[in-house]
Structure formats: C-alpha cells, structure tokens
Amino acid sequence: MNSLDIKDVKVLGETPPLQLIASMQETAVDADPSEIQRRFAEDAYVCLPGFFTQDDVSAIREAVFSRLDEAGEITGTPADGIYSGTSQRREKIADLGQFWREISESWALRRVTHSRALHELCDVLLEEASIPQDYLFLRASNFGRKTLLHSDSGFFARMTDKVVTVWISFGDIPLHLGPLFVMEKSHQHPRVKNALAGFDVARDKDKKASWSETPIELAEQLPSRLLTRHMKPGDIVVFGMHLLHGSLDNVDSDQRIRLSCDVRYQAQSKPQDPRYFGPHPGGTTGAGYGELVGAIPLDEEWHIR
C-alpha cells in the first residue's frame, strides 16, 4: 500500500520514485504491549501518533522559538516558528553551546522527553526497566535542511546496543517540511549489518556515519523503501540502533521551521555511556551541546558526520 502524496517530496533535492516511498505503519498509543513489542521486533520501529498532547507541544514551541527569536531568527509570533531568513546568534550569544544547552534543558522540553509515559513505553520496547540519556538532540530545521541517511549504532551503542531512539514531532510536519523517514527492514540486510559492525563514529574518524549513497540510490540497491508520513504535533517514532533513517528535505516555501527532538532510552541494567549521562554530558565528541547542529545559527551550513 502506498497512500503518500509525493509531489512536494524531496530527498537530497530529488523526487523519489513512487515505488520507493510508502507510509509508516501506525500503532495506537493504547495498543496491547505485546503487539507493540511484536511490531518493534519485526520492523525495528513503531510509530505512535498523538503520544503527547497539543498543550505539551505548544509549551515546547513557545520555549524554543522564543529563544531563537532573541537571536533574530524568527519573524512574527515566535510559536509559529517562521524563519526570518537571517541570524544574529553569533553577535548576540556569547556561548552557542551554553545557549543550546539551556534550551535543551528547559522544563517544557524535559517534562516530555523524560516523562513517565515515555519511560513506560521504553520499558515495554526494551522488555526491561529503561533509563533515558540526559543528553538530547533537539533540531530546528529551516528551509533546505535535511538529515542524511545513517544509523544510530555508531553514536550510541558503544556500551550496549540495547538502546532505542525516540523521535518526537513538535509541530505539524507535512512531507514538504522534512519529517523523519526510516529505511524499511534495512537493519536486516547483510550489507548494512557488515557496514555497521563495530563502527564507532568518535573512534573511526576516517569513516562517516552518513552513507555515501543517497537514500534513493540505496533503496534501489538493497532493495528497500523509505517509510514516512505527515507527522502531527506529539507524534513519536521509536526505532532501534541499526535501522537506517534520515529526513526528507524541508522545502517549505513559507519558511516554516521543522522542530523535532531525539532522546535515547537504554536498558537500565546495561553500562551507561558517560558521554550522554550526568549533569554535564560531553556528547559524542566531548564538546557538549556546542557540537550539535542545533547550536549552529540558522543561516549557516550543518556539519556532516
């Protein structure tokens, strides 16, 4: 089944062939835990629409976009998240890492990313007690931005691969605004398994986490499909460490910013990676929140890992 309207969809500037893109399978928030576990075991992801409330999302949008407005990056009502086309972040903010840390540690955001409801869901998916990482990956993606194809194992599986990523939509994200996609069953493909075996992005500096092929090229080669959907405020997608994923391009002509966040939960019984836990987590490279693309002004290019 393929019910996506892809006329405005771009993946690294290309429109994907219809046979290579399809809708994610949705799972009801109140589904039986055994069914959630079954789907996760089979597909390495579950998509749960409306997991968080509109009030939760509105509070986060107000908290984040008000800070970006201070940096001259927002026009109009801050919570609408419309990019101004310019930035004074470097001129107005003395420490960009501290700036992004303050935003990432706001109560409005943490009460969602570290909520009891999300904790209990990850207990189900990991089939044991879970614990969230303290370090968050918050992204404000304006026109032209996209996240390249990669898996999370090279970042977060150093101590254990019993880790899941929770992607959270903080707004209405139609396909042309650049929502998340996952590459269907890619975690099962021998080529993907071989490429990811033992890879650590911080140690293997001669190798990039992002794939050299475009998502369309790799989907044709495996073969596979890009699974995505029109994300609504409060929707979440939880996926495993070895599933390839990325985002569609934000090609919104109205300059709306896609706001989303990744938080990782792991089995509480497994060793914790000190880079992502504690009151002052250093992050993947040890540079703290300053290493994240979120800390980069909206008028500058993102780095590639």
Image (cartoon, rainbow, N blue to C red):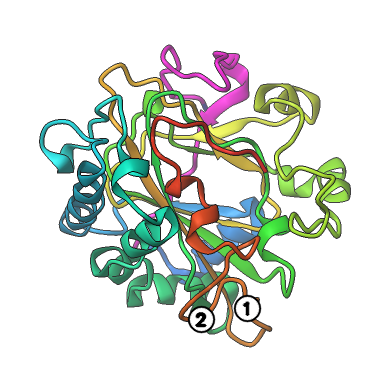
Q: What stretch is highlighted in magenta?
A: 2-29
**From what the image shows, is residue 64 above or below residue 255?**
below
Label 1 is placed on what type of residue? Answer: Pro
Q: Residue furthest bottom?
A: 269
Label 2 is placed on what type of residue? Answer: Gly
Residue 266 screen position, x and y as percent = 58, 74
Residue 223 screen position, x and y as percent = 76, 28
Disc on res. 274: 1
Question: Is 33 colored magenta in this rendering?
Answer: no
The main secondary structure of the magenta stretch is: loop
Q: From the image, tell me which residue sits under label 2.
A: 278
Q: Is 104 left or right of 165, judged from the image as shown?
A: left
CB contact under 8 Å: marks 2 and 1: yes
What crowding class fits label 2: few (fewer than 14 Cα within 10 Å), some (14-19), or many (20 or more)? few
Q: What residue is at 54 percent from the left and 13 percent from the top? A: 15
Q: Is 265 left or right of 80, judged from the image as shown?
A: right
**From what the image shows, is residue 109 above or below residue 170?**
below
**From what the image shows, is residue 304 above or below residue 42?**
above
Which quadrant is the C terminus positioned in?
A: top right
Name the secondary structure under disc 2: loop
Q: What residue is at 71 percent from the left and 54 percent from the top? A: 242
Location of residue 175 (image quadrant): top left
Q: What residue is at 41 percent from the left and 53 percent from the top? A: 96
Decide if residue 23 is in sight here.
yes
Residue 2 screen position, x and y as percent = 50, 25
Inter-mark Cα distance, 2 to 1: 7 Å
**Foreground pick, 132 / 81:** 81
Decide if residue 182 is in sight here.
no
Question: Is 13 colored magenta in this rendering?
Answer: yes
Q: What residue is at 72 percent from the left and 45 percent from the top? A: 209
Location of residue 190 (image quadrant): top right
**Foreground pick, 210 / 84:** 84
